[in-house]
Image: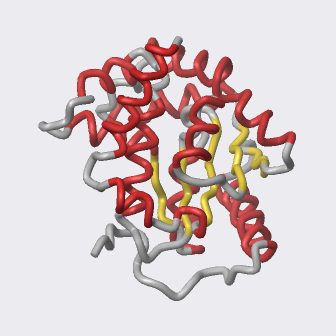
């Protein structure tokens, strides 16, 4: 067990040092940032609705899946093949890698204070590690969508997305992972009253209105104005 923990710690330190020094990480004010996790099954509309929330409330949208795919394609990445395997098999990428990428992405936006992190955490190990290594999330937006609807959306998206996991076999594996590992995360956060459930059974407009109104209420509860006057947080503004 001790040897396993030492390996895990070494791996974590490797991920921490991608692009930023220990001093950079220690001095970054993560605890002052407003982080909202966006969860739901594959194809539930997390990315689509997150993009609209960025426009209306000035969030930075960080997609765990997009960050992993970008790292996978980075020529000098030491994790490319490993990430490709996990994504193809519908499995959860080791949390040290995912959290390292998310933390770097937050640090790439030093002047921005609101972050929507979609598709993360995918299990309780990731959730607890993020709290330890970065900060606690203020809230979880959960897009509740029937599996049949998600399957239709993913197969349709697969016609043009070019994603290795938008095929029927990978989709089935992703659904199993979601039910076994990710859904319990939502249940756990719900115990603390941190989950806002958005039903995806209505029209696109109705679903987004529910998300918009709930986020507006959250920001009001946190004593924050609807859209802060700051730099364009839709782009990397690292100095």
Q: Quadrant of residue 72?
A: top left
Pinpoint residue 94: horizontal percent, then vertical percent.
Answer: 44, 27
In the image, farthest residue toward the front? 2
Q: Quadrant of residue 20?
A: bottom left
4 relative position to 189: left or right: left
152 and 63: which is toward the camera? 63
In the image, farthest residue toward the left? 75
42 relative position to 232: left or right: right
The residue that appears at 45% across and 32% down in the rendered structure is 156
Look at the image and tell me in which quarter the C terminus lies.
bottom left
126 and 174: which is toward the camera? 126
Pinpoint residue 15: horizontal percent, then vertical percent.
Answer: 34, 39
In the image, farthest residue toward the bottom? 229
Location of residue 208 with respect to 129 vertically, above or below: below
Pinpoint residue 201: horizontal percent, then vertical percent.
Answer: 74, 42
Pinpoint residue 14: horizontal percent, then vertical percent.
Answer: 31, 37
The residue that appears at 43% across and 77% down in the rendered structure is 111
Tally the marks: 0
The residue that appears at 29% across and 32% down in the rendered structure is 162
175 relative position to 142: left or right: left
Location of residue 154 with respect to 74 vertically, above or below: above
Colour scheme shown: secondary structure
The residue that appears at 62% across and 50% down in the rendered structure is 37
Location of residue 39 with respect to 153 vertically, above or below: below
């Amino acid at each position: 067990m001790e040897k396993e923990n030492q390996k895990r710690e070494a791996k974590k330190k490797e991920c921490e040092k991608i692009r930023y020094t220990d001093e950079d990480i220690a001095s970054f004010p993560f605890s002052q940032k407003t982080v909202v996790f966006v969860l739901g099954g594959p194809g539930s509309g997390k990315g689509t609705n997150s993009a609209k929330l960025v426009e209306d409330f000035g969030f930075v949208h960080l997609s765990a899946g997009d960050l992993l795919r970008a790292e996978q394609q980075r020529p000098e990445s030491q994790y490319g093949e490993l990430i490709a395997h996990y994504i193809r098999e519908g499995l959860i990428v080791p949390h040290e890698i995912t959290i390292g990428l998310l933390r770097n992405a937050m640090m790439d936006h030093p002047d921005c204070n609101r972050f929507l992190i979609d598709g993360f955490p995918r299990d309780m190990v990731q959730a607890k590690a993020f709290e330890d290594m970065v900060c606690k999330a203020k809230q979880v937006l959960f897009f509740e969508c029937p599996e049949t609807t998600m399957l239709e959306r993913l197969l349709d998206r697969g016609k043009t997305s070019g994603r290795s996991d938008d095929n029927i076999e990978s989709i089935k594996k992703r659904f199993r992972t979601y039910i076994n590992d990710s859904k319990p995360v939502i249940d756990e956060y719900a115990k603390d009253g941190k989950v806002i459930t958005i039903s995806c059974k209505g029209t696109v407009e109705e679903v987004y209105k529910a998300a918009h109104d709930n986020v507006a209420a959250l920001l009001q509860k946190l004593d924050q104005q609807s859209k802060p006057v700051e730099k364009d947080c839709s782009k990397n503004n690292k100095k």
